[in-house]
Image (cartoon, rainbow, N blue to C red):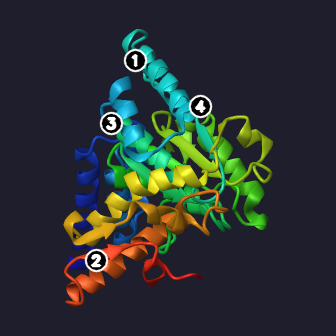
Amino acid sequence: MNNDISAKEAFAALLAKIEKTNLPAGLVEKIQADALFWQDYSLEAKYVDCLTSIPWDNSSKDILDLAYTKEKLDEYHYGLDAIKDRILEYVSVLSLQENRQHRIARAPIFLFVGLVGTGKTTLAESIAAALNRQFIRIPFGGLGDSTYLRGRSHFNPQSEPGAIIKGLISAKTKNPVILLDEIDRVADEAQNSIMGTLVELLDPEQNQNFTDYYVDYPIDLSQVLFCATCNNTSRIATAVLDRLEPIQMPSYTDEEKIVIGKNYLYPKALAETGLNKTEIDLDDLVWPSIVRPLGFDAGVRTLKRNIELLCRRAAYLIVSGQSKKVIINNDNIRQFIPQW
């Protein structure tokens, strides 16, 4: 009898938690009806914790300021003027929608297309920063099951919500920027089901009532700003492409990489390794040697990795007492960046 009373009290506490949280009325009614058949406390407690963690009504306030947006884009990206202009145009449209038409601003869904290291992911991060939104990245590389995106029924003890709901919970807002990263790299056997889920996510007529199998109640994703990336569009379903706006990311020349390395990557690497500018002297003439033989690389990921390697090597020489100031020039560059 005591165990029965204890279980009833525990389930009653879960219902009280639901009623204190600002959940959709229909969901509260559904849970109250389902509670008549609850048996496993741990299972239902996990479910209730998920529901009460979803930001059903919490939104961040957009910053729709062109000067601020341009500042954020320039802060993290060299060049890309045509792409930045596209983003500024859409921030302008969002501003007009919100300020003149007094409706929730909606943006196009950008698909950044380009080779590895061309800045696709960081561009999406910059958009989030410029708009004052939380940023969530969901990787698609090798994804072999659409339930990763939309979860599994909560009646299974091992089940959990899908990546979209997890992203909202992590962001604590219902209007984050969610990057669907490398959507062309899903596993062959799951391509159809994943592309079908993407259509539901990206279609404004459908994502107002997105169904996560774990939550088991429609969720409004219309305020999420989705972005996507891919290396190429050949493996993306036509129905998905129809809901995206492709933006081609350019490859970088050696000269552009030198500017990016000097002004963006090197200062960041110094800060991350804890080095002072006075402790390392990097000869200006050495930059072509840092870029080459990496010039054939379309992106800057390998360049970034090598600059970080250079800074770590310098940090080791200073901390180990072998040098108080590290001087790097064309005579000794290969001691810091080996010729692979």
Closest to the observer, 251 or 281: 281
Q: How far apart are marks 4 and 3 (CA)?
A: 18 Å
Residues packed near mark 3 inside 10 Å, few (<14), some (14 to 19) or many (20 plus)? some
Of mark 4 and mark 3, the one earlier in the sequence is 3
- Residue drawn at x 36%, y 42% as measured from the top left: 129
Of mark 1 and mark 3, the one earlier in the sequence is 3
- Looking at the rendered structure, the kind of residue marked 4 is Pro
Q: What residue sits right under mark 1 in the picture?
A: 98
Can you tell which mark lies on residue 267?
Answer: none
Of mark 4 and mark 2, the one earlier in the sequence is 4
Closest to the observer, 68 or 132: 68
- Helix, strand or loop at disc 3? loop
Q: How far apart are marks 1 and 3 (CA)?
A: 14 Å
Q: Where is residue 83 in the image (x, y as percent from the top left)?
A: 56, 34
Q: What residue sits right under mark 2 in the picture?
A: 326
Residues packed near mark 2 inside 10 Å, few (<14), some (14 to 19) or many (20 plus)? some
Of mark 3 and mark 2, the one earlier in the sequence is 3
Closest to the observer, 130 or 217: 130
Q: What residue sits right under mark 4 in the picture?
A: 204
Q: Do the CB atoms of the residues marked 4 and 1 lie less than 8 Å apart?
A: no
Q: Where is residue 200 in the image (x, y as percent from the top left)?
A: 64, 42
- Nearest-to-viewer mark from 2 and 1: 2
Q: In this view, does 214 lie above or below 106?
A: below
Pick the quarter of the image with the C terminus.
bottom right
- Looking at the rendered structure, the kind of residue marked 3 is Ser
Q: Do the CB atoms of the residues marked 1 and 3 lie less than 8 Å apart?
A: no
